Amino acid sequence: MGLTFSADEIFEMAEDIERNGMKFYTEAAKGAPDKKSSQMLLNFAEMEEGHLRIFEKMRGELKGMEKESSIFDPEGQAALYLEAIANSRGWEGKASPAERLTGKESIEDIFKIAIEAEKDSVVFYIGLKELVPVRAGKDKIEAIIKEEMSHVAGLSSALAEYKS
C-alpha cells in the first residue's frame, strides 16, 4: 500500500510552513537595507500570518474522513516525516529560507529567495495532493495551492516594483 495523508495532516503541514514563512520575512526585515524594504517584508510576514489563519480555519472545517489518516502508524513516524518536511519548507535536504539569511542579502536577493521558496511550496503541495484520497479532502488541498500561488504573484510584483 502506498503512503497517503489526510487533508488534516496536509493542513497541519501548511500551517507549519506558513509559520516558517512568517519567521523568514520577520528575520529578513531586520536586515533590510531601508525602512521601505523592511516594511514590505513585514507586510509579507503579515500575509503569511493571514494564510496561516486561513489554513487553521479550513482545517477546523474538515469533517469525518478528511481528518483520518489512512496510514497505519503506531509509532508516529508519519507525523515526524510531515514535521521534517514542513520545517525544511518543503525542500528535502535544504535549509529553510530563514536559516539561509546572513544579513548581507540585498532586498532583491531576499525577494528571490522568497519567490523560490514559495514556488517550491506550490510544487510541494501539488505533489502532496496526490497522496490525499478524494474521500479524505483532496479538493481542499487545491485551496492551499491557490494561496501559495498568490504569494508568488505578490512577491514577483514587489520585486518588479523595487527594481523600477
Image (cartoon, rainbow, N blue to C red):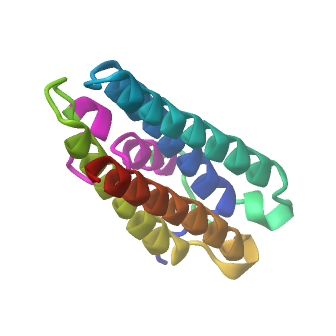
- Outermost residue, top side: 30
Between 110 and 137, the residue placed more toward the observer is 110
Q: Position of residue 138 (x, y in %)?
A: 66, 74
User: Which residue does the image show at 60% across and 47% down from the upper left?
Assistant: 12
Q: Position of residue 110 (x, y in %)?
A: 26, 41
Above or below, comparing residue 43 to residue 81 in the picture: above
Magenta-tinted stretch = 78-99
User: Which residue does the image show at 43% across and 60% down from the upper left?
Assistant: 152
The question of residue 87 being in magenta is answered with yes
The question of residue 34 being in magenta is answered with no
- The picture quadrant where one finds residue 99 is top left
Between 111 and 7, the residue placed more toward the observer is 111
In the displayed structure, does residue 92 sit left or right of residue 123?
Answer: left
User: Which residue does the image show at 86% across and 60% down from the upper left?
Assistant: 63
User: Which residue does the image show at 55% across and 50% down from the upper left?
Assistant: 14
Q: Is residue 52 visible?
A: yes
Q: Position of residue 139 (x, y in %)?
A: 69, 76
Between 37 and 74, the residue placed more toward the observer is 37
In the displayed structure, does residue 9 sit left or right of residue 128?
Answer: right
- The picture quadrant where one finds residue 4 is bottom right
In the displayed structure, does residue 23 sit left or right of residue 95?
Answer: right
Q: Is residue 90 visible?
A: no
Above or below, comparing residue 22 to residue 145 in the picture: above
